[in-house]
Amino acid sequence: MGVTSNLEPKKVFYYFEEISHIPHGSYNTKQISDYLANFAKERGLEYVQDELNNVVIYKAGTAGYENSEPVMLQGHMDMVCEKVPGCPIDMAKEGIKLVIDGEWLTADGTTLGADDGMAVAMMLALLDSDEYEHPPVECVFTVDEETGLEGAEGIDASLLKANRMINLDSEDEGVITVSCAGGITGNGTLPVTREAFAGEVFNLKLTGLLGGHSGMEINKERASANILMGRVLSEIADTVDYRLVCIKGGSADNVICKENVAQIVTSDEAGLEAAVKASQAVITAEYELSDPDIKIELTKADSAMFVPMDKTSGKRIVSYLLNAPTGIQSMSMGIKDLVESSLNLGAINTTETEVTTLYCLRSSVKSRLDLMCRKLNDISEVLGGEIKFSLYYPGWEFLADSPLRETCIEVFKAQYGYEPSVEAVHAGLECGFFAGKKGHGFDAVSIGATLKDVHTPDEKASIPSTERTWKYLLGILKALK
């Protein structure tokens, strides 16, 4: 008996629990890809598994739907692997542990992977049953969405006959998503020089931040530990002579960083303690509503990770964190409350010779995306570093005439008794790549059950919302005759 064996819909939660036993972080998808291919083999379903590990499984339409136009169902199989400090699970080699908390499904100390494991589970539940009415379906399971939508970019469009698609990667029940931002990844480096400096070694650690998804939650003005540490180090330098040794925070470009640790050397312990206390008071007041539990922890270290940076190098790093653009850059003038452009410093790390940065940049306007890239490039060059951009993915433009959208609206009203919200989102969705590959007239929507705090160890999926969304998906398929 599994943890989810008493939950409804049974097959959806059964398959979600099945894949939770399989490590499936980004770039670690071979095992889950093989699981999907074997699933198709065992049921005699036609399938394709490509060299990227994308999998497409085909199923004929049910009685009365044999000649209906096919529909593509799509979601990604990779998840963001984050965990709380001290969690013993090796997410590269081990599955996660599911926990039921009232009406929510979560994981013990790690991300849940409902983004986008729920899409995978729903498609498998549909493929494993003959009781639901539906047209011919092409279930598309892509890889490495969380690192730049690489599976969707690389998939061969000739494998797909469907010219309409239901993406299952949204996170708010009652919302039909019809457009999304495009984006790009930035990898930066800043050189450092090191020299001996007398003093004791201290660790500064920023904790208690909420973090979150850099697309869906960038509008909540939550603090980034990576950016905030730059401010703390700058304020300390006003009264304390210190040298920076290293700085580290985050691991994924699309996650608002929750923790950062900087190591410094100084002989002024009393001054350091006073400066940290002053910064703590300011930060607590400023982030009282968005991040009420931020703490700056100051501890002595047994030894330094490296020889300290010289004063100029340390100043260069702090100046970069203080002045590089971050967070929301523009709001849409055409769609109320929609973030148009933003960027997120998801990860920063230190080697002996350089500090590296990892950015996620998003915009629904290509020229705005180009401008953010230009700003990061300029500040990097001025400070003696560089930044390279890769993994560009296109935005998904709104389709004025969308029969699929209208069907989804009507089915929603029949099931729920009220109008759904039709929205554009700032997060990136794979719909843009599929729309570009399929060309004019490609009709797509994105739906999903309610998820909270995705990309963090607090991630959770609503159990009743999952059941309603499954019923909604079946209703849409039935209506697509």
Image (cartoon, rainbow, N blue to C red):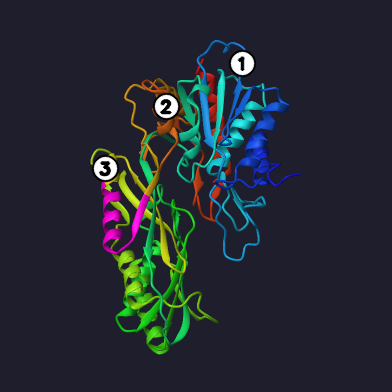
* Mark 1 neighbour density, 10 Å: few (under 14) some (14–19) many (20 or more): some
Q: Are marks 2 and 1 in contact (CB under 8 Å)?
A: no
| Element type where label 1 sits in the image | loop
Residue 101's spot in the image, x, y percent? Answer: 61, 52
Residue 69 place in picture, x, y as percent: 50, 15
Q: Quadrant of residue 85?
A: bottom right
Question: Is tag 3's residue or tag 2's residue first in the polypeptide sequence?
Answer: 3
> Which secondary structure lies at badge 3?
loop
Q: Residues within 10 Å of mark 2 (few under 14, many from 20)?
A: some
- Three-letter residue code for mark 2: Lys
Residue behind mark 3:
332
Which of the marked residues, 3 or 1, is nearer the chain's N terminus? 1
Judged by depth in the image, the label closer to the viewer, 3 or 2, is 2
> Which residues make up the magenta segment?
371-388
Q: Earlier in the sequence, mark 2 or mark 1?
A: 1
Q: Amino acid at mark 3?
A: Ser
From this view, report whether residue 345 is shown above or below residue 273. above
